[in-house]
Image (cartoon, grey):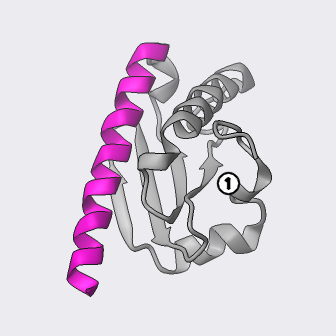
Amino acid sequence: MKPFGYPKELRLLNARDYQTVFNKVDVKAPSEHTLLLARVNNLGHPRLGFIFSKKNIRFAVQRNRIKRITKDYYRLNRHTLPNMDIIIMARKGVDQLSNDEVRSMLKKQFNKLAKRASKLTTINN
């Protein structure tokens, strides 16, 4: 596996993967433009899934731009993330952000997620 690739084992691929996160969310990281939901996994690495609806991001070009930036951020920073299945849900207005604003928002969101996940693991131990 390439160290900075984005292979299938790093993605949430089917409805069951998404449903397990929705059934028991361990960590939430909300912001004005996105919501991250996460659940601890035993795979030894984080996995990422997207829910970007037409209702919140109208044009496919914009949905794909946000996904591309998010995948790139995740791919380069996944080694700093806890072993969790993460779903990123878009909210209205995220498509109005510039690429740099999206990257900055993602950095804050994933840092918030990691911090809350570390609190979760210290509580459980």
Q: Is residue 100 magenta?
A: yes
- The answer to whether residue 91 is magenta is no
Above/below status of 23 relative to 4 = below
Residue occupying image coordinates x 43% and y 60%: 82
In the rendered image, residue 9, in percent from the top left (x then y), is placed at: 74, 58
Residue at the outermost bottom position: 125
Stretch of the chain drawn in magenta? 98-125
Whether residue 80 sits left or right of residue 49 in the image: it is: left
Quick check: 10 above or below 15? above
- Secondary structure category for the residue under label 1: helix
User: Which amino acid, mark 1?
Assistant: Leu
Pointer 1: what residue? Answer: 10
Residue under the point 35% across and 25% down:
104
Viewport quadrant of the C terminus: bottom left
Expressed as whole percent of the image width and height from the top left, the position of residue 63 reads: 65, 29
What residue is rendered at 49% in x and 65% in y?
A: 83
